[in-house]
Amino acid sequence: MAYTCREFVQAGFEEIGLASYIFDLQPEQLQSALRRLDAMMADWNGKGIRLGYPIPSTPQASNLNASTNVPDWANEAVIANFAIRLAPMFGKTVSLDTKTTARESYNTLLARAAAPIERQMPANMPAGAGNYLISEENFLSPPVDYVTTGGEGVLEF
């Protein structure tokens, strides 16, 4: 089961030393931290790292209890990088271990998000001798211009 926004926010606070079992976090602090988490996830989404996080259309539309749909392998990256963004709000310094974890897990996200760009051959490219068994045409079929909807797939009518 995926983390909720509240669980990511609480884990970020724990990472910087403000655990909820020791410190009473005010609702305003939780909402402010949630806006920071939403901003980070929107930034990653813009960079092509799509994890399924529900990015709200306005800051007021964000919900602490919403399920994030972030895969399990990305939780550590979200928590550690969120803690680094959260620490200056509370005058905290992040430990070297947290910074190292954040960098390594972010590199893992980048590696998983990297996909080679699909390339089609132009229509004037000769088919070659091996393609005569499949088709009697002398040239490859023209490229297809897909209109994509992002990382989710091809838009079909």
Image (cartoon, grey):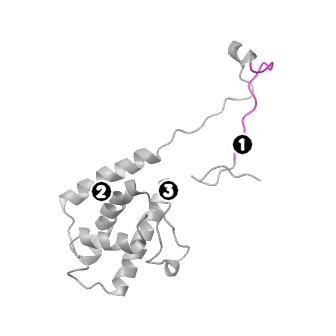
Q: Would residue 61 be found to the left or right of residue 120 on screen?
A: left
Q: Among all residues in the image, which is located at the extreme right? A: 136
Q: Main secondary structure of the magenta part?
A: loop
Structural crowding at the residue carrying mark 1, measured as other residues with C-alpha within 10 Å and reported as few (<14), some (14–19) or many (≥20): few
Query: Is tag 1's residue or tag 3's residue first in the polypeptide sequence?
Result: 3
- Specify the segment rendered in magenta: 134-146
Q: Amino acid at mark 1?
A: Asp
Look at the picture and state if 27 lies above or below 69. Answer: below
Q: Among all residues in the image, which is located at the extreme front? A: 1
Label 2 vs label 3: CA separation? 17 Å
- Residue ID at (47%, 70%): 67
Look at the picture and state if 30 lies above or below 106. Answer: below
Instruction: Quickly name the residue at label 3.
Output: 50
Which element carries disc 3, helix, strand or loop? loop
Numbered circle sitting on residue 115: none
Displayed quadrant of residue 102: bottom left
- Residue ID at (53%, 79%): 61
Structural crowding at the residue carrying mark 3, measured as other residues with C-alpha within 10 Å and reported as few (<14), some (14–19) or many (≥20): some
- Residue ID at (70%, 12%): 129
The answer to if 127 sits in the magenta stretch is: no
Which element carries disc 2, helix, strand or loop? helix
Structural crowding at the residue carrying mark 2, measured as other residues with C-alpha within 10 Å and reported as few (<14), some (14–19) or many (≥20): many
Instruction: Quickly name the residue at label 2.
Output: 102
Instruction: Quickly name the residue at label 1.
Output: 145
Q: Can you give x and y, in whole percent of width and height, for residue 121 in the image?
A: 67, 29
Q: Amino acid at mark 2?
A: Ala
Q: Would residue 19 be found to the left or right of residue 67 on screen?
A: left
Which element carries disc 1, helix, strand or loop? loop
Q: Can you give x and y, in whole percent of width and height, for residue 64 in the image?
A: 43, 77
Label 1 vs label 3: CA separation? 23 Å
